[in-house]
Amino acid sequence: MGVGRTILDHAAWYRDTREAVALSAGFLCQSCKRYIGMHGEADHIIPRAQCEAHGLSEYDRSNLQWLCKSCHSKKSNAERWEGKRRKGPKPIKRSNVPGRKLFLAMAGIPPDGKGQPP
């Protein structure tokens, strides 16, 4: 929530903004173009976590779109998966079983999987 806003201010802002976004979209989902009336959801086009990096306030109405629940869910899930893909592959976990290094050396396998055997 912004500085100086109370919970009641936020609730009033949300209610008024939600109605304005629905009205500006003509009560149609802006993704699938179905009529949804006031049963839709106001969605941030640029996710709230990235607003500051783009120079936007999370309360900026120009960054909102009206989506049906299904399209909003698909978009949110795609954003979550995109965030996980950027992190790269998980590192390989190695066990600390006693005798592991000796076993790998006897088998001719490098202990780190990259270099030469010990």
Image (tube, rainbow, N blue to C red):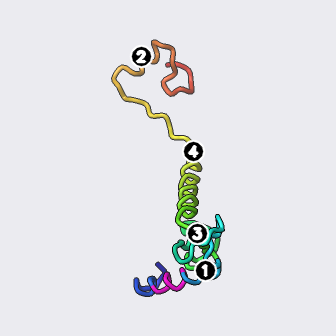
Q: Which residue is mark 4?
A: 88
Q: CA distance from mark 1 to mark 4?
A: 34 Å
Q: Position of residue 94 (x, y in %)?
A: 43, 31
Q: CA distance from mark 2 to mark 1?
A: 62 Å
Out of 48 and 75, give the one closest to the viewer.
75
**Above or below — where is 103 with respect to 63?**
above
| Residue at x-position 42% and y-position 21% | 101
Q: Earlier in the sequence, mark 2 or mark 1?
A: 1
Binning the other alpha carbons within 10 Å of mark 3 as few (below 14), some (14 to 19) or many (20 upward) gives many
Out of 5 and 8, give the one closest to the viewer.
8
Task: Tell whether label 4 touches label 1 (CB within 8 Å).
Answer: no
Q: What number is the disc on residue 22?
A: none
Q: What number is the disc on residue 61?
A: 1
Q: Is residue 117 magenta?
A: no
Task: Tell whether label 2 touches label 3 (CB within 8 Å).
Answer: no
Residue lying furthest front = 35
Q: Which residues are magenta?
A: 12-18
**Above or below — where is 17 with respect to 66?**
below
Q: Position of residue 70 (x, y in %)?
A: 54, 62
Query: For residue 100, which quarter of the picture?
Result: top left
Q: Nearer the viewer, mark 1 or mark 4?
A: 1
Q: Earlier in the sequence, mark 1 or mark 4?
A: 1
| Residue at x-position 55% and y-position 83% | 19
Q: Nearer the viewer, mark 4 or mark 2?
A: 4
Q: Nearer the viewer, mark 1 or mark 3?
A: 3
Q: Which residue is mark 3?
A: 67
SS for callout 3: strand
Amino acid under disc 1: Arg
Q: CA distance from mark 4 to mark 2?
A: 30 Å
Binning the other alpha carbons within 10 Å of mark 2 as few (below 14), some (14 to 19) or many (20 upward) gives few
